[in-house]
Image (cartoon, rainbow, N blue to C red):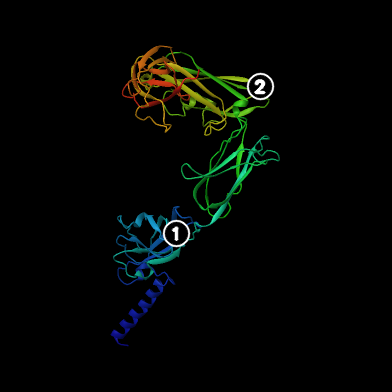
């Protein structure tokens, strides 16, 4: 055979093997391929499903370089072939608006891309690809897939039971259903879809509810002898009926069997002082209570003591908790440091609750121990108004004009005087502290928040607003 004929036959043989590689039948080592070659391949699949309009949908793609040299930066591409449009929100490493991904020979790049369907016209059919400028074989750089989805016209049902766990076994026993409880079905933030009242067995049901995301059910209106620790169940409706067995376990409030009192060892402190918080717990029931833990200053105002976990001991929120024998009392002394910031507010407030689950404060006894932190001058402002038109805000002419106010320090009884101007605004100055407001005249403040904080700069504010109504005779 002539040399030229032999060379031509060998080239044909190599080309035949290379075509099998591209077809996925054999994986020829990169060293056997002729010359420097970049050959990317992509596979993709939808994670989970069926999906709902509006929710985030994840697609997992793998991009492999079966060539023998690293690729130049590769970028993702997507084409909506049919059905609803799928809008990509992120592409991961192959983001078309980013730097792309260079893939080494024989290596696979995992790519997670996410997006949503916002307008419905059938399940989306997509073509997902990956592009590189030095690609030798673009034929296998794309893959088609369909995202399984639920039509937004589909309806679903939601149901469940509210029960009082009287026997403490964690499940609904005969006769434990709580009737007359309001079950509220909502979606998103503040949107009430429907309300139901539980029947004689504590059961409720919502029918013909459109599928969708961000649904929730809460149980409200329980009598004072019960509370629900987990009173907000969130879920998605996909037409499968998976939310027909929601269970709201109600417990007896811990405060029915456990009482708590707290006090501080002094009536006045200086910032940086070591203070002692004395806690007395009493179990008035006929059964032992285990796992009692303390949580304080849930409002995050920073006026409480700085107490280490070690100082809390078994009462700390991450500890096993205190065991209280039936009919007995126990006293605990917890030491903490008076925070520097309390000097600016002139007031130390240690608000605590005691519960079996520190994440859910409902039901346990609550206490408040306070003390004065003197030494700084405060100045704070507020507005007093009568809401004549009932719109919940202060409008022109609604300010409580030219009215005398008396402020009494809740810690030491010191009294300050202030007066509102023509618009109902008032600014009080004096020793920093928490003051109780009294209006001199035929008016009273609505609600329980009648405290006025005189805070030293730079923490003082002028944003307090107080709605007033005529004083009851």
Callout 1 crowding tier (Cα within 10 Å): few <14, some 14–19, many ≥20: some
Residue 180 horizontal/vertical position (percent): 63, 38
N-terminal of the pair, mark 2 or mark 1, is 1
Q: Position of residue 323 (x, y in %)?
A: 61, 26
Dividing the picture into quarters, in which one does residue 434 lie? top left
User: Residue 309 — which label?
Assistant: none
Do tag 2 and tag 1 residues touch (Cβ < 8 Å)? no
Q: What's the CA distance linking mark 2 and mark 1?
A: 63 Å
Q: Quadrant of the N terminus?
A: bottom left
Q: Is residue 179 above or below residue 89?
A: above
10 Å neighbourhood of mark 2: few (<14), some, or many (≥20)? some
Residue visible at 44% across and 53% down in the picture: 54
**Whether residue 269 can be seen here:** no
Residue 421: x %, y % from top left: 33, 20
Using the rendered view, name the quadrant where residue 181 is placed: top right
SS state under label 1: loop
Q: Foreground: 275 or 226? A: 226
Q: For mark 1, what is the residue?
A: 120
What residue sits 40% from the left and 15% below the top?
406
Give me the disc on residue 327: 2
| Near-viewer residue (473 or 248) | 473
* Foreground tag (2 vs 1): 1
């Amino acid at each position: 055979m002539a040399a030229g004929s032999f060379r031509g036959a060998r080239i044909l043989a190599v080309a035949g093997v290379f075509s099998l590689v591209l077809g996925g039948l054999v994986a020829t080592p990169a060293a056997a391929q002729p010359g420097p070659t970049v050959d990317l391949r992509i596979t993709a699949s939808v994670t989970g499903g069926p999906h709902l309009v509006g929710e985030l949908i994840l697609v997992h793609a793998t991009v492999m370089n079966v060539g023998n040299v690293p690729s130049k930066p590769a970028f993702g591409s997507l084409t909506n072939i049919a059905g609803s449009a799928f809008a990509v929100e992120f592409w991961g490493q192959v983001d078309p608006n980013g730097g792309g991904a260079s893939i080494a020979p024989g290596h696979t790049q995992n790519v997670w891309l996410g997006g949503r369907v916002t307008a419905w016209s059938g399940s989306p059919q997509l073509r997902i690809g990956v592009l590189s400028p030095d690609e030798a074989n673009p034929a296998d750089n794309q893959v088609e897939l369909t995202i399984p989805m639920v039509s937004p016209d589909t309806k679903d049902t939601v149901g469940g039971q509210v029960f009082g766990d009287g026997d403490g076994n964690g499940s609904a026993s005969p006769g434990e259903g709580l009737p007359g409880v309001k079950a509220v079905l909502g979606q998103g933030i503040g949107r009430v879809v429907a309300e139901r009242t539980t029947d004689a067995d504590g059961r409720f049901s919502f029918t013909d509810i459109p599928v969708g995301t961000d649904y929730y059910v809460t149980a409200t209106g329980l009598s004072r002898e019960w509370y629900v620790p987990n009173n907000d169940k969130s879920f998605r409706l996909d037409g499968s009926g998976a939310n027909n067995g929601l269970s709201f376990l109600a417990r007896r409030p811990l405060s029915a069997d456990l009482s708590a009192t707290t006090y501080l060892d002094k009536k006045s402190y200086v910032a940086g002082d070591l203070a002692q918080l004395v806690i007395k717990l009493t179990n008035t029931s006929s059964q032992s209570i285990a796992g009692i833990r303390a949580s304080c200053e849930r409002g995050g105002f920073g006026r409480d003591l700085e107490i280490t976990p070690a100082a809390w001991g078994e009462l700390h929120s991450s500890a096993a908790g205190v065991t209280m024998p039936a009919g007995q009392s126990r006293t605990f002394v917890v030491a903490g440091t008076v925070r520097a910031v309390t000097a600016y507010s002139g007031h130390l407030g240690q608000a605590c609750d005691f519960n079996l689950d520190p994440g859910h404060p409902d039901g346990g006894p609550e206490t408040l121990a306070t003390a004065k932190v003197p030494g700084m001058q405060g100045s704070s402002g507020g507005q007093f108004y009568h809401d004549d038109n009932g719109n919940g805000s202060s409008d022109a002419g609604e300010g409580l004009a030219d009215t005398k106010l008396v402020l009494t320090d809740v810690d030491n009884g010191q009294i300050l005087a202030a007066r509102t101007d023509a618009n109902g605004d008032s600014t009080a100055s004096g020793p920093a502290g928490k003051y109780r407001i009294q209006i001199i005249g035929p008016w009273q403040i609505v609600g329980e928040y009648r405290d006025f904080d005189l805070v030293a700069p730079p923490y003082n504010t002028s944003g307090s607003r107080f709605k007033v109504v005529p004083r009851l005779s």
